[in-house]
Image (cartoon, rainbow, N blue to C red):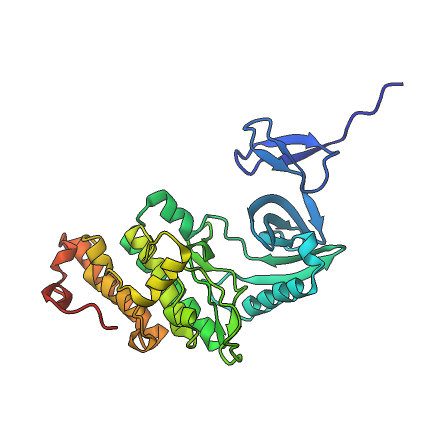
Amino acid sequence: MQPARNSLKLVACPHCGAKVFISGDLAPLEKTPCTKCAVPIMMPMRLRQFELRSEIASGGMGTVYNAYDTTLGRIVAVKLMKVEIAQDEDSVDAFAAEARACAALNHTNIIHIYTFDQEGPHKYLVMELADAGDLDGRIETSKRVPELEVLDVGIKVTSALATALKHGLLHLDIKPGNILFNSDGEPKLVDFGLARKTDAEKDNYAPVFGTPYYIAPERVQQTGESFLSDMYSLAGTLYHALVGHVPFEAATVDEVVAAQIHTPLTPAHVAVPDISVPTSEALSKAMAKNPSERHGSYDEFRMALESARSQLLIRQLTGQPAAAAGSPAREGKSWWRR
């Protein structure tokens, strides 16, 4: 008697788009090379109405998948917790807290959360799909992201942070990797895993979490954190994208952190002369060492970025160089208001 042939499943390769047959004996999430391009193809996995089709990214808490919502007929992202982490109550609570924090925010430039659920041993978060890369990737590819693009991202993310603040929420981990883009090129702020309420009691002995290259001085010194801390981190992120390197470079993390506190910021237009002065000024003020010397509100910061954008567009249309902006900064005005 002839042995039965293995069953086959038709799937689409996420890399080349070809529809190919893979062995039906593969376990859910198991991968096999595409017969057309050799890039690994994943055996789909079903969680309620969500069919996980391909991996987008993986992190400490879990893996994010491109998935299809069979009920509503739309593509979504599913963040699946690692099984070992899903068994830890504190980790699950943190995961759920992130879901609740994001779900309370309704803004075009904040990733939308659809549900947080569990099936069997699997705990997962379903959210809006933004799979067109992140700002970190654009920096890596371009080295220096075009100024107009940086300003557009800054204006939109500043507006997103203002909405979070209205809900009493601080993000506390603004960095290029946490600004994703959807297929329309719209920036989406993600990862509220470190977020906390503005009225939450601060434990001065608790460890400080955040990314050293963008963390505000007052957070390092534990002298208090506020929306101005997020403003500083966003400005540092925009500076990195604009100039092509982080605001403060050093050999060790400790030296980077010390520089956030003690080293004067080199203005963006000094680091790269073709950056316009208004953009440089807006970022330098947002990164003042003393929080009280930063922009007084997100509206003020956004207006400074919008003004810089308008002036940049005018110069581009008229052919004026950035140095012709006529800013007092070019006439010896001090940048070090610390």
- For this view, does 263 lie left or right of residue 136? left
Q: Residue at x 61, y 36 (%)?
A: 41
Taking the spot 49% from the left edge, 64% from the top edge, the residue there is: 209
Relative to residue 120, is residue 169 drawn left or right?
left
208 on left or right of 270:
right
In this rendering, the answer to whether 61 lies above or below 39 is below
| Residue 257, image x, y percentages | 38, 62
User: Is 129 situated left or right of 174 in this image?
Assistant: right
Residue 159 placement (x, y as % from top left)? 40, 68
Whether residue 315 is visible, yes or no, is yes
Q: Residue furthest right?
A: 1
Most foreground residue, 235 or 182: 235
Residue 110: give x, y in percent of width and height. 48, 63
The image quarter containing residue 220 is: bottom left
User: Which residue extends farthest left?
Assistant: 331
Tell me how many marks there are: 0
Evaluate whether residue 213 shows in this view: no
Quadrant of the rendering where the C terminus is positioned? bottom left
Q: Is residue 29 above or below residue 254?
A: above
Locate the N terminus by quadrant. Answer: top right
Give x and y (percent) for residue 131.
50, 49
Q: What residue is rendered at 19% in x and 61% in y?
A: 277
Nearer to me, 314 or 250: 250
At a point 54% along the width and 35% down the height, the residue shown is 17
Residue 232 lies in what quarter of the image?
bottom left
